Amino acid sequence: MSTRTSAPSTTATSGLDRYFKISERGSTVERELRGGLATFFTMAYIVVLNPLIIGQAQDADGRSLGIPQVAAATALVAAVMTLLMGVVGKYPFAIATGLGLNAFVTFSIASEMSWADAMGLVVLEGVVITVLVLTGVRGAIFDAIPAQLKTAISVGIGLFIALIGLVDAGFVRRIPDAAQTTVPLQLGATGQLRGWPTVVFVLGLALTAILVARRTKAAILISIVVTTVVAAVVEAVFDVGPSFTPPDKVNPAGWSLNVPGLPDSVASLPDLHLLGHVSVFGAFSRVGGVAAVLFVFTLMLADFFDTMGTVVGVGAEAGLLDEDGTLPGADRVLLVDGLAAVAGGLASTSSNTTYIESAAGVGEGARTGLASVATGLLFLLALFFTPLVSVVPFEAASPALVVVGFLLITQVKNIDFDDYVIAIPAFLTIVVMPFTYSITNGIGAGFVSYALLMATSGKARKVHPLLWVVAVLFVVYFAIDPIQQALVG
């Protein structure tokens, strides 16, 4: 099954329709706005989560950025860059601080230097990516990937975002003593489903599945809203509380991130003093040129291929790719994404990137940049209404990710599993993504194994030269720690 919706071909009757190609892509203004809402609700958590990762962590000088300040900057950059993606990229892709990238910046980079120095490296990473786009290198790499590997990327992302949804909702959890067992994950907090938040998630998942199976309009959005209301009622009646309260109070049966209910306040003025608090080249004098370059390289490679995987996966589900598995006009999307990395560094929110949660909007029928404009405007509102963003709990938004993950996985039928030279790299791409919790790792495993199998099968000349370069770079990426130790000492 796919969420691709068909609409009668109509003549573009307005400038808005012509600019965004709404009728041409078989969509309507209503679907685009609905999709923009769905995407926002599934990724609005970043306004709450990014400050918890970056805002309270200390840099090498013992300074922290501040949770309210990071929340405001996170919402602002997401708003501006998602709007730019809609207007310039003209596709339904939303942008915000990249998870994984922010953790790397926080725990691997800022721990070695000041926050201003660390964000300077993020700016440099974004500049490098932007140059690669403007020179055509990034687009050329995108086009050099075999169509079936692109399909595998989409399928892997399907599994990945389904796992994200299950983990975010607490349905799947790490085993506390995982080092003492061969099983790293379990069902719920104790190996059994437990707590009202889990009940809310299961009800939300059932509702989403039923509505999507019945091809109900606004299925995902309806599910998120209804499940949020149910969650708020449950919290009001049973006083469940959060899963963790600083400094050390743990409640395994609590809400994963946001506690649903009416916020203490509706609006607040944003504190944007972090904007421009950056030292572009400070890291080079702080940790040395070699270490700084390796940090930028690691950030760039992760950001580069995370975006590529997202564009392929979401674009495929939306039916926007051509027969070669390429997104027409992808250079515009990649350019905005590169600039988003620069903007994230300048605002001290870490590198911003295209979000896989955009698939939720596509699931609602979004096919154009108008959906991104809607999402961007909602992030702009969130800048002033951050208390309201915390109303939607993971348990209400995560069912959408699980169902959209299923929709992406259906593309696996387009992979030729009788041809092991392509099937094994496709398989590694698909499984490494969720099993390592990284789109980039999955793509790297697929590229390296594809180049290896093609070479050992006497087909090395059929591999695009750029793909060979990328495969070698991924070997360096996977071995970055021993390389860094060898060079830095």
Image (spheres, rainbow, N blue to C red):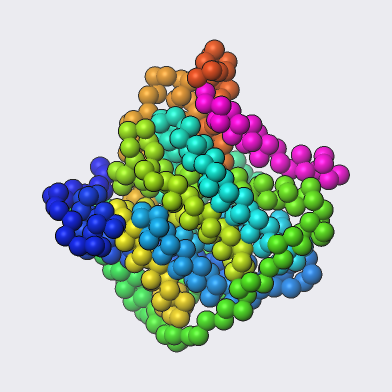
Res. 320 image quadrant: top left
Q: Is residue 213 visible?
A: no
Residue at the image point whose x is 36% and y is 43% from the top: 328
The front one of 270 and 51 is 270
Q: Is residue 372 visible?
A: yes
Per the picture, the main secondary structure of the magenta-coloured stretch is: helix
Residue at the image point whose x is 13% and y is 50% from the top: 8
Relative placement, left or right, of 245 versus 192 is right
- List x then y, in percent, for residue 131: 58, 49
Residue at the image point whose x is 57% and y is 15% from the top: 456
- List x then y, in percent, for residue 70: 58, 72
Range shown magenta? 463-489
Residue at the image point whose x is 27% and y is 60% from the top: 32
In the orientation shown, which residue stands out farthest toward the right?
489
Q: Is residue 141 above or below residue 452?
A: below
Res. 28 image quadrant: bottom left
Q: Quadrant of the N terminus?
A: top left
Q: Is residue 483 magenta?
A: yes
- List x then y, in percent, for residue 401: 38, 54
The front one of 253 and 298 is 298
Q: Quadrant of the C terminus?
A: top right
Relative placement, left or right, of 18 versus 478 is left
Q: Is residue 277 magenta?
A: no
